[in-house]
Structure formats: C-alpha cells, structure tokens
Image: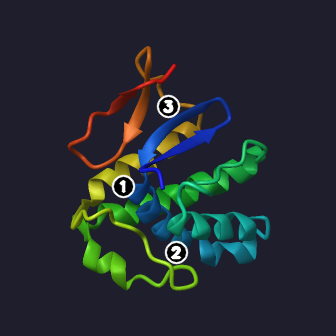
Amino acid sequence: MSKSVYVGFRDQGFWAFDVIVSILLKHLVEVAEPKVADNQWLAEVVHQWRVGTVIPDSCGVNLDDNWSDEQVEVIVLLFEETCKMLQEQDNITAEQIAQWQLLDAMQIFCRGIPVFSAKSIVDLCEAIILMLCGRLPPAPAGTWWWYGVEDHPRTIPRRE
C-alpha cells in the first residue's frame, strides 16, 4: 500500500498522504450523504468516496473530469462545508479513528501515527477546492504539490 495518493482533476493534480486523504473522505462522506436525495448522481460519488476512505490508493478522492459545471459547484460546496467542519477541530487521534464505523468493518490504517492535525486535512481540502475551481497554482518546476502532515515539505520532486 502506497503512502501517497494522487489527487487530480482535469489538467491539474498533486500528491497527498493517504491517511490525510482517508480522514478527509470520512468527513466528506458525512457531509455529502444527506445531499444525495437532492442529487441522485451523487450517490455513486459518495460510494466511491466511502471506498476511498479505507482503500485510498484504489479509489482516492474520485473527482470526475466529466462533471458539468453545476455538478462541480455541488462538489465544491460539499468540500467547503467539510472544511468548515474540520476547522472546528484541533487534532484527530488514532484512537478516535479506530472508533469510526466505515465500510464493512474496515479501518483507516494510521501508519503508527498517534495524532493528525486538523489543519493538515483542511489544507488538503482547500487545495482540492482550488483545483476544482481551476485556481490551484502550478507547483514549482520539477516538483509536485504535496499535502501531508504539517512538518512535511509542501513539494516533492517529480520522477522522470
């Protein structure tokens, strides 16, 4: 299982730490599920996000390049609401994560890390919003943007 997950939309993308992606997706699913009744197309998206919560390197964030402008607007609103919810927290512990009921009793693998800063998850969420809106700035030459735990560099080198 890779520690990094590629998050891409249309012609933009970056890499993120898989545990941070999983934590974001768990909260995103909670925000999105009540909205499915008003947006039936969202049911499959939410299901993929739920799978991505426990298998992030398989499904990841699942942003569909073919979404209409109206669908992208709905997705952006979901990420914005998720961001606001996460901003109310300081940290998320591995103990809390172990209590979450996710998919078929599968759990998020925390890689031995006891505490995750909510700020790291908010940073990832905000980057996804920028990407969905076409406003994510390009990474410096020869690098990718990287979203992980706070003490990681914000870029990683591109492999040839």
Q: Report which residue position mark 2 lands on.
A: 30
Q: Report which residue position mark 3 lands on.
A: 136
The reply to whether dot 2 and dot 3 touch (C-beta < 8 Å) is no
Q: Residue at x 38, y 66 (%)?
A: 85
The image shows residue 114 at horizontal and vertical percentages of 21, 67
- In this rendering, position of residue 108 left or right of residue 116: right
Q: CA distance from mark 3 to mark 1?
A: 17 Å
In the image, 112 versus 145, the foreground residue is 112
Q: Report which residue position mark 1 lands on.
A: 121
Q: Judge the density around disc 3: few (<14), some (14-19), many (≥20) Cα neighbours within 10 Å.
A: some
Q: Judge the density around disc 1: few (<14), some (14-19), many (≥20) Cα neighbours within 10 Å.
A: many
The image shows residue 32 at horizontal and vertical percentages of 59, 70
SS of the residue under disc 1: helix
Name the residue type under label 2: Glu
Q: Quadrant of residue 116?
A: bottom left
Q: Residue at x 48, y 56 (%)?
A: 1
SS of the residue under disc 3: loop
What mark, if any, has residue 53 been given in the picture?
none
Name the mark nearer the viewer: 3 or 1.
1
The reply to whether dot 3 and dot 1 touch (C-beta < 8 Å) is no
In the image, 121 versus 20, the foreground residue is 20
- The mark nearer the N terminus, 3 or 1, is 1
Using the image, determine if residue 37 lies above or below residue 77: below
Name the residue type under label 3: Leu
The image shows residue 51 at horizontal and vertical percentages of 60, 68
